[in-house]
Amino acid sequence: MSRNLISIQDFSKEEILEVLKMAAGFEKNPSQPIFRDKVVASIFFEPSTRTRLSFETAANRLGARVIGFSDAGNTSVTKGETIKDTIKMVSNYADLIVMRHPLEGSARYASEISPVPVINAGDGSNQHPSQTLLDLYSIQKTQGRLDNLFINMVGDLKYGRTVHSLLQAMSHFNPTFLFTAPEELKLPNEYKEYLRKRNIRFEETRNLSDGICQSDILYMTRVQRERFTDAIEYERVKNVYSLNNSMLDGAKPNMKILHPLPRVNEIALDVDNSDHAYYFDQAKNGVYTRMAIITKLFS
Ligand code: CP
């Protein structure tokens, strides 16, 4: 049976640390064509810049060849072909499938059909485990550790799949969380229960300025228009937070701002030159981390 990465919970703490260690090796030496005989399929049913291009770069740097699509509108899905049949076909052609889809659970479903490994590159508001691994890599690299950190997650905590995956992964490392969100975008109860069961400390606030000074990591997220069924509700909350440079006075010297990107208005451009800004480096770390994930699944 092939190994998949659908939820971050599919990897143990030891496996997460193993991937981070491998990623550090790939950062030191990014051209390692060890999978010249492999084909990676990159199938994206939802838009992406970073995840798709960094996975494809990772596969290329490992010597694999890449097939796939970035727009299902150019595939036989438009003629009514099901996910099941699409996955059966793609797994005939490729040795590993990287898939993004707007439906929660679609990646798990694909993994149950596919004889080759499947990596979930984001399924609706559920999970984005490869993002989490690059987030962990970025946290470890900037803080020198993963244990005992104060993580402030800000923005769309309801639909934010990167938030859901990251809080589960960080739970291995005794974090303290602050969840900063408006009422409409609060962290769902199932995730709070998850933390309570593991005795992980967390508090909630609506006020962005409440936790900036305590934070080791300020994890900003976009309010995602594509997840709202009610356009009026989106309009009400879309600009709820906007971090600017003056708000960073008093932040701890080690504090880093992470964001899975893309950003819209939640981080002002004047933050980009701050020593606290790390989101562009974070995205670059995606290549090394995804090289490590592909290597682990091929091994
Ligand atoms: N972080 C992330 O998933 O970005 P993309 O949507 O551009 O892939």
Image (cartoon, grey):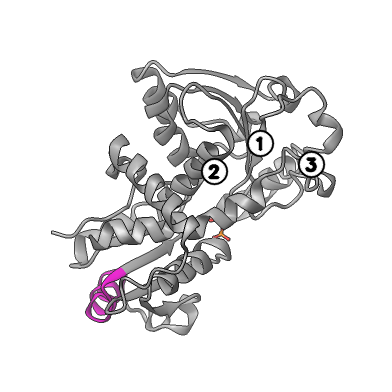
Q: Residues within 10 Å of mark 1 (few under 14, many from 20)?
A: many
Measured in 3D between alpha carbons, the distance from the residue under mark 3 to the one under mark 2, in whole angstroms, is 17 Å
Q: Is residue 218 visible?
A: yes
Which residue is pictured at 65% across the width and 55% down the height? 262
Residue type at the position of mark 1: Lys
Taking the magenta stretch, the answer to whether it contains residue 93 is yes
Q: Circles 3 and 2: CB distance less than 8 Å?
A: no
By secondary structure, the bulk of the magenta-drawn segment is best described as helix
Which residue is pictured at 20% across the width and 65% down the height? 113
Which residue is pictured at 46% across the width and 45% down the height? 132
- For mark 3, what is the residue? 274
- For mark 1, what is the residue? 256
Residue type at the position of mark 2: Ser
| Magenta range | 82-96
Q: Position of residue 230 (x, y in %)?
A: 62, 49
Q: Is residue 266 above or below residue 206?
A: below
215, 35: nearer the viewer: 35
Residue type at the position of mark 3: Ser
Taking the magenta stretch, the answer to whether it contains residue 90 is yes
Measured in 3D between alpha carbons, the distance from the residue under mark 1 to the one under mark 2, in whole angstroms, is 9 Å
- For mark 2, what is the residue? 138
